[in-house]
Amino acid sequence: MLKSLKIENFRCFKSFELQQLGLINLLVGKNNSGKTSVLEALQLFCSWDNLEPLSNLMINRGEYKWSKDRIHELDIRHLFNGHEIQPESRTDINIIGVNKNNQEEDLKLSVVINSNHSEDNSEKLELIIKLTRNSKLEQIKLPLSKDGFLSADSRTFYRSSRDKSTTKTQFIGSSSLTTRKMMQLFDQVVLTPEEKLVEKALQTVEPNIARIAVVSAEINRSLDVRSGFVVLLNNQRVPIGSMGDGIWRLLGLALATVSAKDGFLFVDEIDTGLHFTTMSDMWKMIWETAKRLNIQVFATTHNSDCWQSLAYIAKQEDATEDGIRIHRIEKDKKKSIVFTETQIVIASEREIEVR
């Protein structure tokens, strides 16, 4: 579990720090304050040797172009503060985390000029991703185009030699998970105790749901539509896509949470599609699962009901000293404003706005 994180030269942040991190961390703040960027920095740090998240987060933001052979090329300039890269001055992205053992880990993204010139004697750029952990350095080198673009397929150039020890991370955007992703996650938990946790999550919205199943036709895996899942409802087989946004969102949240065992869960705009009456049950599910499966959770919201529902959990549950935190992010501030469990409860009871 992370105790703190410092971000340098990443997206809108020249320098920014999150302190006093808990098991559950809710990020609040105005639009364009950098909440999603903090989630992305955390995800890159926690899954540094898996390049798929890097590709996905840039494609989701539209930070790419199509090459002649129709392959995505990622415009990595937008990862850097100021939207520019300067190999000559070595303007690097640094993400520095301190874990529960007070050990510091440093992730660095650098764009450098490759000294090994090609046959035409032209300069070549590289993106070098380095992680320093326990005084050991590990790195990935990826070729860039002369304009600084990274092929979205470059992630296939590197295969982690530490597959079995790679930290599990799950990221849910504001638009929820795709059907293909949700099916993949369900395949991992079916016929395990975690499958019951997923069913229980859906029952917070519809108590009469008795079972979840996957319709495994390949078309459902390939289309980005709300299909592929059915539930047993009042002894009838009902497509889950016909039951509304809340059920679909909860299914994705529950699947991602139980699949992040011993790792990290990141959720952008966690309240999307959820009625305020459901949020306390949603937080209770996440809190109990995070404790049981050793998952550190980071989420964002603009919703007052969302943080106040978390305050209810902080009051009702046996939250440990480092259990629940709200971090307010303010533009141009170098540190987040941290609210502990006690402060969250007091703010809710006295109607003090923390956002």
Image: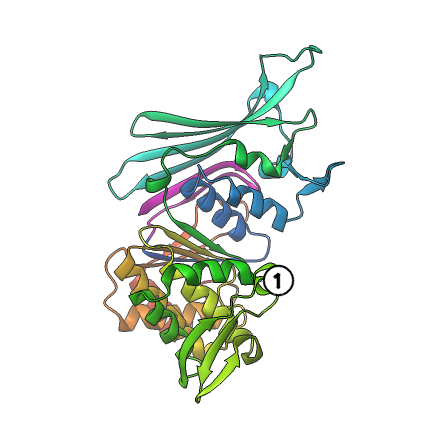
The residue positioned farthest toward the bottom in the image shown: 234
Q: Residue furthest right?
A: 68
Q: In this view, does 186 lie above or below 46?
A: below
Residue 37 part of the magenta segment: no
Left or right for 263, reference 48: left
The residue drawn where x is 26% and y is 44% is 100
Which residues, given as a range, are shown in magenta?
Answer: 1-21
**Residue 24 horizontal/vertical position (percent):** 35, 58
The residue type indicated by label 1 comes to Asp
Q: Where is residue 253 in the image (x, y as percent from the top left)?
A: 44, 65
Q: In the rendered structure, does residue 7 fall within the stretch colored magenta?
A: yes
Left or right: 74 as drawn, with respect to 168: right
Q: Is residue 51 above or below residue 354?
A: above
Secondary structure mostly taken by the magenta-highlighted segment of the chain: strand
Instruction: Decide which of 121, 335 is in the foreground and name it.
Output: 121
Name the residue: 62% across, 36% down. Answer: 76
